[in-house]
Image: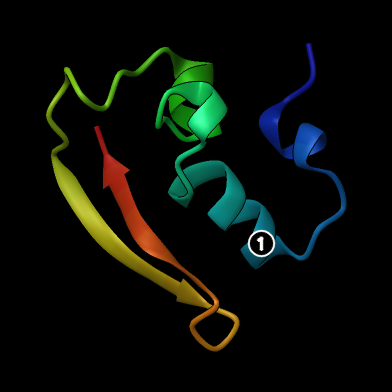
Amino acid sequence: MPTLMKMVGNCPPCISYWYTYIRPHQNLNGKTPAEAWRGIDPYKKPFKQERWFEAWDGLLVGYELKH
């Protein structure tokens, strides 16, 4: 089975990271691909830590939630 990073492709690392770990996806019911892959429901399981992410001069932004 392919890993998440292989599915994202050859994007620059900051875009791949943002897409996989930061950006919630509508088709995944508001989960990030990493949460969906690991079976984490961010709306049922409270997060332990949050970290602000910003890259590409503020075009890629969001919170990374650690569960």
The image shows residue 33 at horizontal and vertical percentages of 55, 31
Looking at this view, name the residue that lies furthest to the bottom.
57
- Location of residue 17 by image quarter: bottom right
Mark 1 surroundings within 10 Å by alpha-carbon count, few (fewer than 14), some (14 through 19), many (20 or more)? some
**Eyeballing the image, is 22 above or below 61?**
above
Q: Is residue 63 left or right of residue 14?
A: left
Residue under label 1: 15
Q: Residue at x 70, y 62 (%)?
A: 13
User: From the viewer's perspective, is 10 left or right of 49?
Assistant: right
Local secondary structure at mark 1: helix
Residue sitting nearer the eye, 24 or 7: 24
- Of all residues shown, which one is farthest toward the right? 10
Could you tell me which residue is drawn at 43 percent across and 27 percent down?
A: 35
Quadrant the C terminus occupies: top left
Give residue 4's position: percent from left, percent from top. 68, 31
Residue located at (55% from left, 56% from top): 18
Q: Quadrant of residue 63?
A: bottom left
Q: Nearer the viewer, residue 15 or 24?
A: 24
Type of amino acid at the residue the image marks with label 1: Ile
- Residue reaching furthest front? 26
The structure residue drawn at horizontal position 17% and vertical position 21%, both measured from the top left corner, is 45
Q: Residue 19: x, y in percent?
A: 60, 49
Picture layout, residue 20 above or below residue 53: above
Quadrant containing the N terminus is top right
Residue 61 sits in quarter: bottom left
- Please state the total of marks drawn on the protein image: 1
